[in-house]
Each structure stands twice: as C-alpha cells, then as structure tokens.
Amino acid sequence: MLPRYIQFMTKLEVFTSALDLPEPDRAKLVLALLRSLEPGAGLAAEDWDQAWDSEVTRRLNDWRNGKARSRPADESVQRVRERLAALK
C-alpha cells in the first residue's frame, strides 16, 4: 500500500517530484524502479542484470564513438517535463 500522501498525487505530480530530486537520489530511484520490474521472457535476475549491463555498455560506447549525442541534464529534464505535461 502506498503512503497516504502519495495516494492523492497524480502521475504527473509523482514524475515531476522525482525529476526535482537531486541527481544521486534520482539515480537510486531509477535503480529501484528497474529492479522492481519483472525480469522479461523468463530471464533470471542475474541474466536481467547482465542484459542491462550490456545495454548500458553499448550506449556508453556509442556515445564515446560519436554514434550518440548527449544533452545537458537540465535540458533533458525540461524535455521530460514538457512531455509529461502534454499527457494531462
């Protein structure tokens, strides 16, 4: 059961509040959310973790090799906020 104050928050309010967290807390939240997902397609938790490790490594290599670009965090957060606001 969710804490009482969260029961009355909209999804947009939850998302916006999460985006306002300091970066270390957002990182912890992301990890907690990822771990809360059921491993897909019958993967064991270790295989799920390995798949995510591989994906993160691939994305990092793409960035290092110029195949992907980065954005400042504040720009990315603003884009997410705009997309969430459009969901209202």
Image (spheres, rainbow, N blue to C red):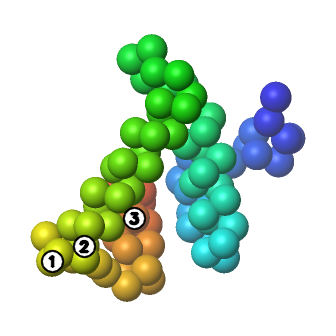
* Closer to us: 15 or 63: 63
Q: Which one is in front, 13 or 59?
A: 59
Q: Position of residue 43 (x, y in %)?
A: 46, 21
| Inter-mark Cα distance, 3 to 2 | 20 Å
Give the percent coordinates (x, y) of residue 54: 36, 48
Q: Are marks 3 and 1 in contact (CB under 8 Å)?
A: no
The residue labelled by disc 1 is 66
Of the two numbered discs 3 and 1 on the same chain, state the one appearing first in sequence.
Answer: 1
**Front position in the image: 23 or 18:** 23
> Regarding mark 1 in the picture, which secondary structure is present there?
loop
Vertical relation: 56 (above or below) 3: below
Left or right of 48 on screen, residue 3? right
Q: Nearer the viewer, mark 3 or mark 1?
A: 1
Position in image of residue 63 (x %, y %) = 24, 73
Residue sitting at x 65%, y 47%: 32
Residue at 76% x, 45% y is 6
**Residue 50 relative to residue 67: left or right:** right
Which mark is nearer the camera, 3 or 2?
Answer: 2
Residue 18 position by quadrant: bottom right
Neighbour class for label 2 at 10 Å: few (<14), some, many (≥20)?
A: few
Please identify the residue farthest to the top as the structure is shown: 42
Mark 2 lies on a secondary structure that is helix
14 is higher (above) or lower (below) than 22 = above
Task: Find disc 2 in the rendering and name its residue.
Answer: 63
> What amino acid type is highlighted by mark number 2?
Trp
Classify residue 61 by image quadrant: bottom left
Q: Are marks 1 and 2 in contact (CB under 8 Å)?
A: yes
Q: Amino acid at mark 3?
A: Val
Disc 3 marks which residue? 80
Identify which amino acid the numbered label 1 is placed on.
Gly
Quadrant of res 15: bottom right
